[in-house]
Amino acid sequence: MRFAVVLLAVVLTFANAARAGETLTVYTYDSFVADWGPGPAIKESFEGECGCTLNWVGIQDGVAILNRLKLEGSSTKADVILGLDTNLLTEAKATGLLAPHGADLSGVKLPTKWTDDTFVPYDFAHFAVIYDREKVAIPPTSLDALVNGDSTQKIVLQDPRTSTPGLGFLLWMKSVYGDKSKDAWSRLRERVLTVTPGWSEAYGLFTKGEAPMVLSYTTSPAYHLIAESSDKYAAALFSEGHYLQIEVAAALNTSRKPALARRFLQFMTGPGFQDHIATGNWMFPAGRTSKPLPEQFGTLVKPAKTLMFSSDDVAARRRDWIAEWLNVMSK
């Protein structure tokens, strides 16, 4: 009997060690896992708590993550996907590859009510046109002013086929212009310097001075204020309102580490993850933090109106709306 107890203890010890030594693979976007992004600090925090290994896989941008998931199907190596947004929820669920999160989201706070049982939200911000104060004396005060403005003052945009900001801007245009968006794109095209696959490339061109404007977030100036002590870059406040992005994560039902995946999703709602969002991902945290936001976040522009399509609407129309955009921009 004593031998059996000892043997059971040894077996349990090795089983726990195997669980502790597991590797969790998370697909996310490139900027999240960059040296200057929140990924490295979050990896250290989670690994210190779980005794496991967190393996980030950087993939261009949010839409590209979904595209890769569709391509890989049930053979995907991902345990968790992190970096889609509310525009892609319906389409992502349609893959049949996602599992219920089972997380306690009582600590999550967003500008809108959250009831989804698959995705865990981790940050949010409104999209905005960021401009260089030294090059743009009079910034656009509306989307219409951007569309019809000086064509010599260029903007860098992202591709809606691969990028969640790119898709967000396309939906912003559709929210404001509706059936007239094709004509609006035709006029805006003259101001577009280039369209990049993802956010990182676009913002890099902007900060290198290639264009005086870029599509980003109302929170982007906080980076320059805090990290560089510079107010050179600012967000233009648009009278029609701004499109909201809520970024999310979900576990895969094909994962061989479902318990660890669920543990990570729960971890995302607390300070170990959320403390690194404001000054790592430069977005508003969606969960509990251990301290208030830096005071510079209080100086950011605050859109008076929030624009959003439902994920069902986006899933039904995204292909047509992108085709419309491509038809104009490829001419």
Image: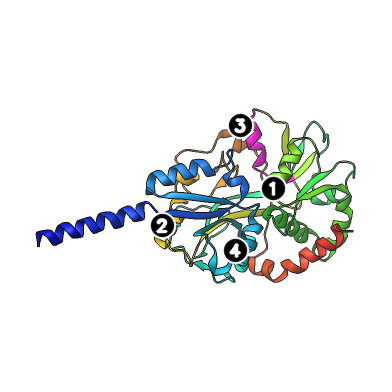
User: Helix, strand, or loop for circle 2?
Assistant: helix
* Residues shaded magenta: 215-229
Distance between the alpha carbons at the discs numbered 4 and 2: 20 Å
N-term-proximal mark, 4 vs 2: 4
The residue shown at (82%, 61%) is 326
Are dots 4 and 2 in contact, CB under 8 Å?
A: no
Read off the residue under disc 1. Answer: 199
Are dots 1 and 2 in contact, CB under 8 Å?
A: no
Q: Is residue 222 highlighted in magenta?
A: yes
Distance between the alpha carbons at the discs numbered 3 and 4: 36 Å
Read off the residue under disc 3. Answer: 226
N-term-proximal mark, 3 vs 4: 4
N-term-proximal mark, 1 vs 3: 1
User: Helix, strand, or loop for circle 4?
Assistant: helix
N-term-proximal mark, 4 vs 1: 4
Residue type, label 1: Trp
Distance between the alpha carbons at the discs numbered 1 and 3: 20 Å
**48 lies left or right of 36:** left
Which one is in front in this view, the residue at disc 4 or the one at disc 1?
A: 4
User: Helix, strand, or loop for circle 1?
Assistant: helix
Q: Residue furthest top?
A: 229
- Residue 76 horizontal/vertical position (percent): 54, 63
| Mark 1 neighbour density, 10 Å: few (under 14) some (14–19) many (20 or more) | many
| Mark 3 neighbour density, 10 Å: few (under 14) some (14–19) many (20 or more) | some
Say which quarter of the image contains residue 296. top right
Are dots 4 and 1 in contact, CB under 8 Å?
A: no
Residue 69: mark in rendering: 4
Residue type, label 4: Leu
Say which quarter of the image contains residue 234. top right
N-term-proximal mark, 2 vs 3: 3
**Can residue 104 be seen in this snapshot?**
no
- Residue 97 horizontal/vertical position (percent): 53, 68
